[in-house]
Amino acid sequence: MTPSPRQTYWQFFLWVAFPVHAWGIAIWLMNADAYAARALSEAFGLGGYLLLGALVESLLVFGFFATLSLLLPRRWPLLQRLDALRGLLLTATFWALALQAVIAFVIRQPARHAAWVQVLNAHWGPLLLLLALILLSIGLPLWAATRPGWRRLLAALQERVSLFSVLYLGLDAIGILIVLFRNL
Amino acid sequence: MAAIGWSNPAMLSRREFLKLSALLPLALGGVQHIPARQTAPPGTPNILIILFDTWSAENLSLYGYGRDTTPNLRHWAERAIVYHRHYSAGNYTIPSTASLLTGVYPWRHRAFRLYDRMLPAWASRNLFSAFPDVHRLAYAQNPIANVLVKQVKANLDHYLPVGAGIAHPDPIFTPLFSSDQVVASGARNTLFRGRHSPSGSLFLAPFYNRLRLALAARQRAAVREQYPIGMPGIDDENYLTIEDSLRLLVEETAGQTQPYLGYFHFFPPHDPYRPHQNFINRFRNDGFEVSRKPIHPLHHAEHTPQMLVDRRGYDSYIAQIDSELGRLMHTLQQRGDLQNTIVILTSDHGEMFERGFRGHFNRSLHQPVIHIPLMVFMPNQTERLDILSPTSTIDLLPTIAHWLGKPAPPWAEGQLLRPFQPGPPDPTRPVFTLEAKENHPSRPVSPYSAQVTRWPYKLTEYMNYSELYEDYNGELVELYNLETDPDELHDLAASEPALVTELRALLTRQRAGEPA
């Protein structure tokens, strides 16, 4: 049965919410100790803000990709467009994680950072490579959205991811309550 | 006429009973937060505490500093009580502010770490709970001091959030979450400011940081003429000026319910030192010589030319505060406030640019970081009085009690300040400072730095720091005679063992009662 546009967008929202929340919660777990040492309520407070941040971020990223979907060919069926968006978000997530890794492992060592910037400034090669990677990141998901095997995999993933995302949205509600309580 | 079910308790239905029970916690909570109110006797003065964060007495010309950083204060000091040997109870905001608010040393309130609160008992035993018959208002511009003020908020009649004195707050977090500034700004930094660790926001961090930098640049451009090196700010997000900050004080105290007890804790001259255009070049090429002091074993920086530049920036910032303070005192005088208000000028800790220490968030207890200003302006005072006995942050609470005609609260560890204390000065009175920011409040402190000053001697213990194990077997003890050696250059610990033992016994006594 073909899902309605509303269901399609809801599924995509859950798809967006998953990496954003999973990352936010991982970062909360990394930072909560320092806050819990002061007061447990502060560790939960931090969690509340991070969940609220993750919800807002999910909405913004969803809005961005939903707008982007207007650029996809109209002749594509709704589900195929959804798969293209899912693929694009996957690559975007990959790049976002790569950027975080660069921040964590390269930028924290200023000498290495400076060396990278120097390389990028002095040579066209790395810049062209970067451009090619970006084009590939956009082209590959659009092409993959026409491959039945890939689309089945995405559908199977969506099923599992949605479960987690719904749980995360429940946590968001608790996070909002925590933030409201702390600011009343 | 329809009967009202709960007009007769016997007729309460189960549903009505449950409804009423649900309201009970609300009612109790409400009762708890209504401050007790009596009427202060007529003639009770207002008390106005004005605290500048990170304001070292060692950098004020009022106390003999080589650069003329405080010409206005010197003028106003002619009608004030000037305390020359006033010591903070900690070397940064949390322990020392907690000591000011509670009147006890950090060994007892146990607020040691950044963002620590005092032990819960102090939420109802503090400067504000002790004087319920005056109107109590408080403002802390420094978010970490605000943590402590918020802890005693239930004892206040008027609480001002951090954002009240921030001229240009960050666009989202400060306005939205002003009541929960510390955790909200921590969350902001966790979400977006991954300089050395990943950001909590997977996609938006680069965009938020771009926006933040763009706003900061716009801010700088708008005030470039007045603040060419940028506006002073907290955490490089919330920008403020000392002019605006003091204006808040003037506005809040105008027409205030009297008598009041006001506590205003301002962020300047805390780092970043970004004075107004008129003060930036105040001390450039002035030939001022800094005496070189030995690098301390616990140092975290080297003595570099940048240290001298930073010191000059700090001094210039102090000069601007002095100018604005002069204007504030003039305004208070014009308004007639000085006739019925006791004004206290002080700080929470100092700042240092020597011995391999820059700033104050370190383990040092040398004079620049713990010797702080204290000036008291009594109503209609016309002559200057200089007090040379050592005094401590914790002495303010019992003295305020005296001014308000109350006995000192039983828990207060401090003494009445001179000249309000009868009898001759006690030459054996020790004052203490504790730095223990690496410690949990519920455990005995270790490692720590602690000092005791019993004039003219000052003994400092640096205990159990890992850096000290190789060369000092974990403990470093320094003893100075501040009368003959105010720069703490000649350590007497080896040549005065009896005195060392005696002063260390005083520190041991302070530690008594710590959790096992």
Image: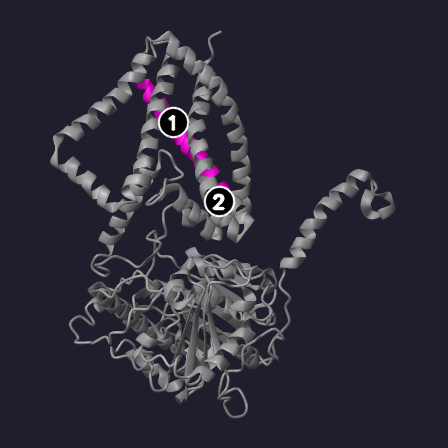
The overriding secondary structure of the stretch rendered in magenta is helix
Return the residue nearer the eye: B249 or B98: B98
Up/down of A56 relative to A114, above or below: above
Helix, strand or loop at label 2? It is helix
Q: Position of residue B78 (x, y in %)?
A: 36, 86
What is the CA distance from the residue labelled 2 to the residue labelled 1?
30 Å
| Figure quadrant of residue B453 | bottom left
* Residue B341 showing in the rendered view: no
Mark 1 — on which chain does it sit?
A
Q: Nearer the viewer, mark 2 or mark 1?
A: 2
Up/down of B280 relative to A9, above or below: below
Check chain identity for marks 2 and 1: say if they share one: yes
Task: Answer with left or right where residue B483 lies relative to residue B138.
Answer: left
| Figure quadrant of residue B172 | top left
For the magenta stretch, what is the residue range? A46-71
Return the residue nearer the eye: B317 or B263: B317
Mark 2 — on which chain does it sit?
A
- Mark 1 crowdedness (10 Å alpha carbons): few <14, some 14-19, many ≥20: few
Judging by the rendered image, the residue that carries numbered circle 2 is A32
Q: Position of residue B286 (x, y in %)?
A: 17, 75
Please give the label number shown on residue A63: 1
Give yes or no for residue A61 being in the magenta stretch: yes
Which mark is first along the chain, 1 or 2? 2
Q: How many marks?
A: 2
Give yes or no for residue B474 being in the magenta stretch: no
Q: Position of residue B332 (x, y in %)?
A: 40, 75
Task: Answer with left or right where residue A158 lies relative to residue B320.
Answer: right
| Residue pictured at 51% horizontal, 68% vertical | B106
Task: State yes or no: discs 2 and 1 in contact (Cβ < 8 Å).
Answer: no
Q: Extreme bottom residue here?
A: B424
Q: Amino acid at mark 1?
A: Gly
